[in-house]
Amino acid sequence: MATHPGGLTAAARPAVVNPDGKPASGDVTAVSVRDLIRSFGPKGVLNGVDLDIAPGEFVALLGPSGCGKSTLLRALAGLDHDVRGSGVISVPERVSVVFQDSRLLPWDTVLGNVTLGLQEHDAEARARKALAEVGLAGREKSWPHELSGGEQQRVALARSLVREPQLLLADEPFGALDALTRIKMHGLLRDLVAAHRPAVLLVTHDVDEAIALADRIVVLDGGRVATIRTVSPEVGTAADAAGHENLRRELLTDLGVAAVSH
């Protein structure tokens, strides 16, 4: 397990997670967070967060703006060196991050963006395979400005997955996309996660997106984990649909929002 490089955390002993989010014993987790505190100036953002994510598990992180969702994700990514804090974080060696902005280099081709930083002799072949997986075979020589927003995010996903991450961190990766493109990207992400089996932490403001994608949903409030809810398998019957609608109402209540029936 890799430790956080910022000097604020140390390696955590691998822990276990039950479906209710409580530690158990016997299995190793992909992510372990204990008593994580992060502050910006005098303002406390994370106030003692505990969280475990199992290998291959998809966890969605919900909460109001400013509750610390992106701060937690950046801490797991090791991108928060300039903040004050304490706690213990343990993550796998291979971690990839996808942001709301695809962050493609405009002066490089699609293929060049996917192979960025890869040193392996087969990097180009792996990148071409990853682009095919996201539906962009044949676009290797295209420039980022020639792609739609959805296509740019597909390239960003390919760039992350070509590294075969053990942990994929996604910070509202579909927030800037239109509704139809978002639905298509949900299906693509589900397929990619099923094929590659990384643990996933998705930050989102969208309750329906969380239900559609996640195995568990964690609600942050006041810089702490307020609620953890398990998502039932994909809707296949009327009872499944009713269960998802009940979960949606519960999550909206957790977030302090009145539920509106679909």
Image (tube, rainbow, N blue to C red):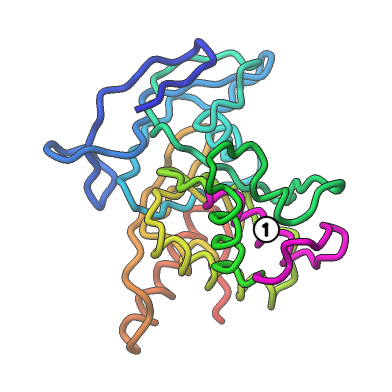
Q: Is residue 126 above or below residue 36?
A: below
In the displayed orientation, state which residue is furthest to the left: 26
Q: Position of residue 135 (x, y in %)?
A: 62, 72
In the displayed orientation, state which residue is furthest to the top: 7
Between 97 and 229, the one lying in front of the other is 97
Q: Quadrant of residue 84?
A: top right
Quadrant for the C terminus in the image: bottom right
Q: Is residue 186 above or below residue 57?
A: below
Judge from the rendering whether residue 175 lies leftward or rightward of residue 97; answer left or right: right
Q: Position of residue 156 (x, y in %)?
A: 66, 53
Q: Identify the residue at horizontal 42%, vertical 38% (top origin).
A: 225
Residue underneath mark 1: 155
In the displayed orientation, state which residue is furthest to the bottom: 238
Q: Which residues are magenta?
A: 137-162
Between 229 and 98, the one lying in front of the other is 98
Q: Identify the residue at horizontal 51%, vertical 45% (top origin).
A: 163
| Residue type, mark 1 in image | Val
